Amino acid sequence: MIGAVDDILMHVKRIGPVVRMFLVGLFAFVLAALTYGSRGPDTGAVQWILYGLVGFVPSVMSSWLVHKYVEEPQPVAAPT
């Protein structure tokens, strides 16, 4: 799901790669923190931040890898 958000943001030309990585990471942070932060006997700000980082770090790393290694398709000239 986070990869789909990254793909959507990748097609917006006005958003640079660093901003895209930050937005994807922020989205993943909030989703992971809301999903796991209030579960179990240990709840609080520390657990909320730690669970958020579990979403933030992998999403930023995968977005960076996509930016670094995936080549944009180049337009080809029509044969004449």
Image (spheres, grey):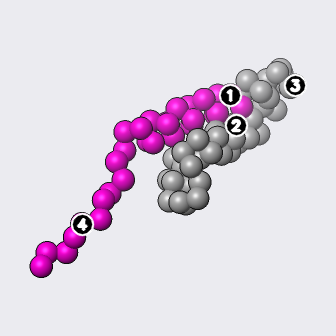
Measured as percent of width and height from the top left, residue 26 is found at: 69, 41
Q: What element does badge 1 sit on? A: helix
The residue singled out by tag 4 in the image is: 76
Front residue of this view, candidates 8 and 35? 8
Label 4 to label 1: alpha-carbon separation:
41 Å
Where the C terminus falls, by quadrant?
Answer: bottom left
Q: Nearer the viewer, mark 4 or mark 1?
A: 4
The residue singled out by tag 2 in the image is: 29
Q: Is residue 78 magenta?
A: yes
Q: Nearer the viewer, mark 4 or mark 2?
A: 4
- Residue 49 found in image quarter: top right
Q: Which residues, given as a range, are shown in magenta?
A: 52-80
Q: Of label 2 and label 3, which has the lower sequence position?
A: 2
The residue singled out by tag 1 in the image is: 53
Q: Residues within 10 Å of mark 1 (few under 14, many from 20)?
A: some
- Residues at circles 2 and 1 in contact by the CB criterion of under 8 Å: yes
Q: Residues within 10 Å of mark 2 (few under 14, many from 20)?
A: many
Q: Of label 3 and label 4, which has the lower sequence position?
A: 3
Q: Of label 1 and label 3, which has the lower sequence position?
A: 3
The residue singled out by tag 3 in the image is: 44
Label 2 to label 3: alpha-carbon separation:
15 Å
